[in-house]
Image (tube, helix red, strand yellow):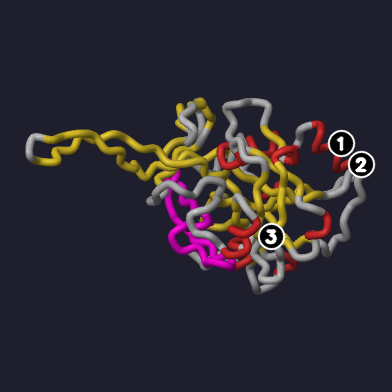
Amino acid sequence: MPAIPPATLNTVAYLFETEEAAVHGVPSDGATAFLVFVPPTTDAMGQEYVVTNGHVLGSKSELWVRLWGPTQEPFCIPATAWMRHPDPNNDVVVAPVPSGLRGDLRVVLVESFVAKDQHSIGPGSDVFMVSRFLSHDGGPANQPAVRFGTIAMMPNRPVPFDLPDGSRIDQVSYLVEMHSIGGHSGSPVFVSPFSYSAPHLAAQWVATPRLLGMDCGHFTREEKVDFGHGRSGTIRVNSGMAVVLPAWRILEVLHLTPLVDARRAGRSPSPSSTQPN
């Protein structure tokens, strides 16, 4: 496949529990998020949002967000600013990006979201995930990693899925053979190869990745182990199968009345304020 555009890598944000952890890049702290952009309409402003899993926010009072730019200071989003999906079986939260940070963002356009009735993808379709690899994430600067996989099952029925707090949800999800381990919650998952277009018959073709959805976690299974000397037990083994929330479920949150009303109450940003991937 062709090289992934750097702007796509830079749509990913890192999440931390404290400002100090965000500044110094504490490797054991935090998770992944990404930025999306809802474009302006005739009666509403455009708005950038941070998107991640509901279980990442959990019961925390706030999350600190660190963007890709080396000059961007981490910013805090309190728990009250995150909007949850009304369906508890939808593990996603979104929050608006503060207006003062709109000068140099990389975003995923909602127009690139894979639709529910999309028939051009299916089991075997190639995908890639851009995420924070906690074991080697760049330290004080974001350095996302990319994992590659294939769709194993389409989101035709809810998937029973255990959250880190021990609760269980039945979430409509893609199952993706991601060749990865856990720890990538909140990461965007894109369809590859890219869809290509040649505007104005230009010789240079432009790659536009489509958003399949968001990684929510990986299935594990129990295996019996013989420890020797008459001792045995079970251990949990990662199956490599990722649970990916469909992009259209994220779109449902972005269309909730409070967020729509907030966009209608504001002013549209200048056309150059946001750089799509």
Magenta region:
123-151
Q: Is residue 124 within the magenta segment?
A: yes
Q: Is residue 230 within the magenta segment?
A: no
Indicate which disc residue 74 carries: 3
User: Around disc 2, counting alpha carbons within 10 Å, would you say few (fewer than 14), some (14 to 19), or many (20 or more)?
Assistant: few
Image quarter for residue 224? Answer: top left
What residue did someone put label 1 on?
261
Q: What element does badge 1 sit on?
A: helix
User: Where residue 254 sits: x, y (%)?
Assistant: 73, 39
User: Where residue 34 sits: x, y (%)?
Assistant: 63, 52
Q: Which amino acid type is marked by label 1? A: Asp
What residue did someone put label 2 on?
265
Spatial CA distance of label 1 from label 2 is: 6 Å
Indicate which disc residue 209 carries: none
Q: Which amino acid type is marked by label 3? A: Pro
* Label 2–label 3 contact, CB within 8 A: no
Spatial CA distance of label 1 from label 3 is: 27 Å
- Up the image or down, 165 lies above or below 140; here it is above
Camera-side residue of 155 and 58: 58
